[in-house]
Every structure is written in structure tokens, then in C-alpha cells.
Image: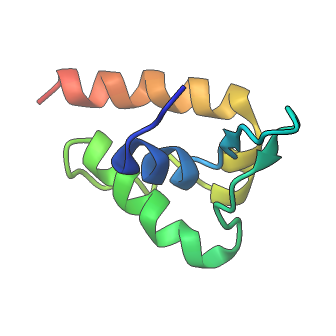
Amino acid sequence: MIWSAEQQRLLGAMGFQLMTRVTSAVARPVATGSNAADFPELRQALRRAAGDRDIEGLVEDLERLRREPALKRALWSRLRILRRSQ
């Protein structure tokens, strides 16, 4: 699948590593960066998803959020509730 630059940025901020096709049919990860410098982008994306509300009470550990899909699923349901209450 071909992702736009914006989609790649958002997926990278959420901790996903995108794969690319190479001619030898072996996929390799695209560098997305997983150090603490990416957390401001993730925090900003989450704040936008929350309708510019404070997200500090929703997310305690961003590194853990990036690693664990179950936490991401739980967070998105809470973000939907926040957006609907606007």
C-alpha cells in the first residue's frame, strides 16, 4: 500500500514501522525514529484527535502506548467519547 506523507508521519508518530518493497522481495523497515524526540509529534497528534483538549489524564506512558496495541485501542475509544462530547 502506498501511504501519503501525512499518513506516514501520523503512523510514525503512533509507533508503527512502515515496510517498503525491494526488488529482492525482502521488506525492510522505513526509519520512523522511536526516540523521545518523536513524542512531541505524538502528543500533538493526540491533542488534535482529542479536539484540542488536554490529554495528560488520558496518556500516562507514551512509550508504552507506542508499543502496545491494546492501549492504543483503549485510547481511541476514549478519544471518540471526548470528541462526541464537544
In this view, the residue farthest toward the bottom is 37
Looking at the image, residue 57 sits to the left or right of residue 53; the answer is: right
Q: In the rendered image, is residue 61 in sight? A: no
Which quarter of the figure has residue 34? bottom right
Number of marks: 0
Residue 21 x, y percent position in the rendering: 72, 37
Scheme of image coloration: rainbow
Q: Looking at the picture, does residue 30 appear above or below residue 17?
A: below
Q: Looking at the picture, does residue 25 appear above or below residue 61?
A: above
Question: Quick one: 64 or 81, which is closer to the camera?
Answer: 64
Q: In the rendered image, is residue 4 in sight? A: yes
Looking at the image, residue 11 sits to the left or right of residue 61; the answer is: left
In this view, the residue farthest toward the left is 86
Residue 25 x, y percent position in the rendering: 85, 32
In this view, the residue farthest toward the front is 23
Question: Quick one: 52 or 37, which is closer to the camera?
Answer: 37
The residue that appears at 67% across and 67% down in the rendered structure is 33
The residue that appears at 71% across and 26% down in the rendered structure is 70
Please state, as top left, top right, bottom left or bottom right, where the C terminus lies in the image. top left
Which quarter of the figure has residue 63? bottom right
The residue that appears at 63% across and 57% down in the rendered structure is 62
Question: Quick one: 41 or 86, which is closer to the camera?
Answer: 41
